Each structure stands twice: as C-alpha cells, then as structure tokens.
Image (spheres, rainbow, N blue to C red):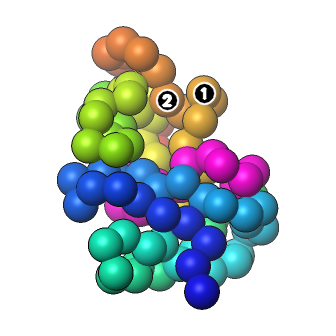
Amino acid sequence: MFNAMMVNPNDNVAVVIEVISKGDLVIIKMEGDTKELEAKEAIPIYHKVAISDIPCSWAVIKYNEQIGIALKDIKMGTHVHTHNLGSKMIECEGEQL
C-alpha cells in the first residue's frame, strides 16, 4: 500500500495522501513503481515531501512543473511547504546536505 504519489519522474517532491508522522515510512507510487523513504518530520495530508535532497536555490518540481525555489537545503524525507519554499531566488545560508 502507498501513502504518497508523484506524477512525473522529473519531480523532486511527492504528495502524501495521509497524515505522516516523523519516522514513518513514506511509500511513493508512480507509474506502477514504488519508492520508500523515512519521514524526517511530520507531514500533513496533501502536503509535499522531498523525495531527494534539494539544495538551496534549486527548483522544486511537482507534476513536472517548477512550483518554487528551495529557500534552504531541503533533505530527503522533509516536509516541503512555505517555510522552505519560495517564489524567487534568495541568498541561501545554512546547513549542508
């Protein structure tokens, strides 16, 4: 059974379809394949999870479209939302992936 899905293999985020708790296994469905990763934090239903590391200032891709820019390094398994996703380039500070 899966609890997240992505539409395009170019996506670097997936949408969770149930509430995910920190430490839960996220099982992502895409075109018959599955990918598994550990949630680094809680993720609300219908929000995004990073399926790979996304460096600061890189594009966040959902449904094969750029939906924003990473405001800081986003690690795989992390919740992606307005706290780490912006609409324009910024000078990044912070943690290393």
Residues packed near mark 1 inside 10 Å, few (<14), some (14 to 19) or many (20 plus): few
Image quadrant holding the N terminus, namely bottom right
Q: Amino acid at mark 1?
A: Thr
Residue 66 located within the stretch drawn in magenta: no
Q: Which residue is mark 1?
A: 82
Q: Which residue is rendered at x = 40% and y = 82% of the image? A: 34
Residue 75 seen in the figure: no
Query: Which residues, given as a range, are shown in magenta?
Result: 43-55
Q: Position of residue 72 (x, y in %)?
A: 45, 34
Q: Do labels 2 and 1 touch, CB within 8 Å? A: yes
Q: Where does label 2 land, which residue? A: 85
Q: How many marks?
A: 2
The answer to if 45 sits in the magenta stretch is yes
Cα gap from disc 2 to disc 1, whole angstroms:
5 Å
Above or below, comparing residue 69 to residue 23 in the picture = above
Horizontal relation, residue 76 to residue 48: left or right: left
Q: Is residue 83 above or below residue 42?
A: above
Amino acid tagged 2 = Leu
Label of residue 56 in the image? none
**Could you say where residue 76 lies in the image, as x and y percent from the top left?**
45, 61
- In terms of secondary structure, where does tag 2 sit? strand
From the viewer's side, name the closer residue of 25 and 62. 62
In the rendered view, tell whether residue 19 sits above or below residue 28.
Answer: above
In the rendered image, the vertical position of residue 60 relative to residue 18, given as above or below? above
Q: Looking at this view, name the residue that lies furthest to the left.
A: 10
